[in-house]
């Protein structure tokens, strides 16, 4: 079986599982968020362990799971009115401060290095917190932007780059990516956000276009950062969950960068 055929088959299987969960939302989606966040943190820790980083993936996972559950509960109970959104943001900031104090004490008591402390925080901020933000609007139609913007960006960038790509975008990080492909990815993201805004998610068209443009840009940055991490740690993929696609982080590198942007739309416009 060719590599492309493996990628197509595994992508179809993944979509058949994920799309019904997205449509149903609620606790099925919560379960998916919890599972994926833990496994993604494990993949990230496995990659950096090759550079002798000694973080605490269990601690990072526990913190992330607690914050995801707390946020999901707040969203379900309060439905996040304007007042409750402000309360949540203030509570989240206070929680991060407390988290910092507790984890620093934990690592110092265990005689861990500052590097280990910082990398554990990197696991939480890079993987955990985006899923925490996602949990806050996981019961709204905005989740479709989270999934369709990366798909449109990646597909358009790959297609345009394959047909017209000449100028390298970041050859030292990802040699196959081109400027022409990146432009195609941005256009694809804008088109899909406009289509969603017209037919499914009622937000102003100018805001949808801006979301598509910024979202496409963030997807490209997220993809490049993941490539940079893999190049730095000397691995090809973060895992082998999906044949031809790699691990969870190989598929989520763009999504975790688009989530904060959609969250801003949620707390300001929605």
Image (tube, rainbow, N blue to C red):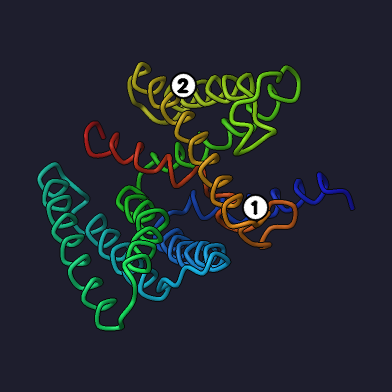
Residue sitting at x 39%, y 40%:
141
Residue at the disc numbered 1:
16
Q: Position of residue 122 (x, y in %)?
A: 38, 58
Q: Position of residue 164 (x, y in %)?
A: 72, 17
| Mark 2: secondary structure | helix
Density class for disc 2 (Cα within 10 Å; few <14, some 14-19, many ≥20) is many
Horizontal side, residue 243 vs residue 46: left or right: right
Q: Nearer the viewer, residue 131 or 191?
A: 131
Label 1 and label 2: CA atoms lie apart by 25 Å
Horizontal side, residue 152 vs residue 7: left or right: left
Earlier-in-chain disc, 1 versus 2: 1
| Mark 1: secondary structure | helix
Quadrant of the snapshot with the C terminus: top left
- Total marks placed: 2
Q: Position of residue 249 (x, y in %)?
A: 55, 54
Q: Nearer the viewer, residue 266 or 196?
A: 266
Q: Position of residue 150 (x, y in %)?
A: 53, 37
Disc number placed over residue 202 in the picture, else none: none
Q: Is residue 110 above or below residue 261?
A: below
Residue sitting at x 52%, y 26%:
189
Q: Nearer the viewer, residue 134 or 122?
A: 122
Residue at the disc numbered 2:
194
Residue sitting at x 17%, y 69%:
101
Horizontal side, residue 121 vs residue 162: left or right: left
């Amino acid at each position: 079986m060719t590599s492309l055929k493996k990628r197509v088959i595994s992508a179809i299987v993944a979509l058949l599982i994920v799309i019904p969960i997205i449509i149903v939302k609620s606790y099925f989606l919560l379960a998916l968020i919890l599972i994926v966040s833990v496994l993604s943190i494990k993949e990230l820790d496995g990659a950096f362990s090759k550079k002798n980083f000694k973080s605490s993936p269990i601690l990072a996972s526990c913190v992330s799971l607690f914050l995801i559950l707390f946020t999901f509960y707040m969203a379900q109970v309060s439905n996040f009115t304007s007042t409750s959104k402000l309360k949540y943001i203030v509570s989240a900031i206070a929680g991060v401060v407390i988290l910092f104090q507790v984890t620093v004490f934990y690592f110092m008591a265990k005689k861990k290095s500052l590097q280990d402390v910082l990398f554990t925080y990197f696991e939480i901020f890079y993987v955990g917190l985006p899923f925490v933000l996602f949990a806050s609007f996981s019961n709204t139609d905005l989740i479709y932007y989270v999934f369709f913007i990366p798909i449109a960006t990646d597909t358009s960038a790959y297609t345009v780059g394959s047909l017209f790509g000449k100028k390298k975008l970041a050859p030292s990080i990802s040699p196959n990516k081109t400027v022409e492909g990146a432009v195609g990815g941005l256009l694809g993201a804008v088109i899909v956000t406009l289509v969603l805004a017209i037919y499914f998610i009622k937000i102003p068209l100018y805001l949808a276009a801006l979301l598509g443009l910024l979202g496409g840009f963030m997807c490209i940055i997220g993809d490049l950062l993941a490539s940079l991490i893999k190049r730095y740690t000397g691995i090809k993929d973060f895992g082998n969950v999906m044949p031809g696609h790699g691990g969870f982080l190989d598929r989520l590198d763009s999504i975790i960068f688009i989530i904060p942007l959609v969250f801003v739309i949620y707390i300001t416009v929605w």
